Amino acid sequence: MALGIALLCLAGVSAGQAVLFYASGDPEHNTTPPTGALQDSGWQWLGTWGTFLGTPVHPKFFLTADHVGGRIGDPFRFRGQTFITRSSVRVPNSDLRLWEICGVFDDFAPLHTNRNLAGRTLVWFGRGTERGTAVTLTNQETTELRGWRWGPDTRRTRWGENRVEESVESEKVGHLLRATFDADGGPNECHLSAGDSGGPAFVLEDGRWELAGIHYAVDGPYSYTAAGPGFRASLFNHQGFYRQENSEWVPTTDLEAPEPGSFFTTEVAAYAGWILDSLAGPIPPDDAPFLQRAGAVHGPFADVPEAVINWDNRTISLELPLEPVFFRLRGCQPLRMTGARIEHELLVFDYE
């Protein structure tokens, strides 16, 4: 299914923090690790990336949403330790970004590789808003509850459950999983809200919990009228409201049956091959440098991706520049160049 509607990215609004529930507005609901059949279903792999979540997927890399941003040198916190980021790469045609850290994770989540998730129940983790005030709609003399606005900004990690309805495709960010807030998912049924971006969803596969999704967006915002103003909410039935699409308010009054709001997470299995191939090479040591260059001594400096680094010989080589240029090293540890020479039309640096 191709996705053509406008969506509200979960990092593009006020930064709230925890998944939102149908059955409970209790701010303490599901704020501790799941137990019983859901024990070790992903909570043990949650790390914090700014105000968002990220998930280690390799001893040196964690995965999160690309649109939450971040910079090289920012901290990632996992199991009481702080890891400084040293590089990153966007997974092509997706809203996923891999970040490399200085140091080594002592554990990481396995990736889900099966794309047939329709009908499967996932465990969803996030730091989005609490459930706020009720959203109602009056038809003649009857006032019906339709959902809840996004509430306070407590920045608490929560977990919930929901079923995947289908896989959809977005021209902008590729393959997504769609779930709905349909009031039929039990006491842990959840919806996403602002601040949940980058959070993971896990699925149980052959007795092992695997990373299945990284949160991207939700339906909305909504409005009572064609002129706005809009509001952000998690609705289990948006029939009778207007939904914003391409800066216009589009009515949903022509729907024949109750229509629940949807939320979307990037389908990890669609990109697992690329990710696993990218992580299959040798792990760079923390004293491996990045070469940077600039046209002026004070910068700005940028990485030189074509530079070839030999960790064993501690050399860096690249094509001889055709114009004056300044070089420097960056890395997890203090580094310095100890020599430079020309070999076979290559510029070669020694470093320590």
Image (cartoon, rainbow, N blue to C red):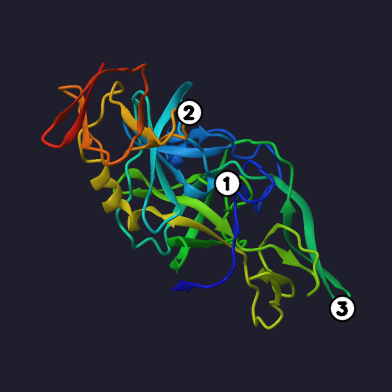
Instruction: Give residue 77's position: percent from left, percent from top.
Output: 49, 27
Q: Which residue is mark 2?
A: 298
Q: Is 195 situated above or below 43?
A: below
Side of 64 relative to 228 (left or right) = left
Determine the image quadrant of residue 174: bottom left
Camera-nearest label, 2 or 1: 2
Q: Which residue is mark 3?
A: 140
Q: Residue at x 61, y 63 (%)?
A: 219
Q: Nearer the viewer, mark 3 or mark 2?
A: 2
Disc 2 to disc 1, how far (Cα)?
Answer: 39 Å
Q: Earlier in the sequence, mark 2 or mark 1?
A: 1
Identity, as a three-letter code, of the amino acid under mark 1: Asp
**Which of 344 and 292 lies nearest the eye of the viewer?**
344
Specify the quadrant that holds the C terminus: top left
Residue closest to the far left: 344
Q: Along the line of sight, which residue is nearer the eye, 326 or 218? A: 326
Under mark 3, the amino acid is Gln
Looking at the picture, how far across and down is residue 36, in whole percent? 46, 38
Q: Which quadrant holds the N terminus?
A: bottom left
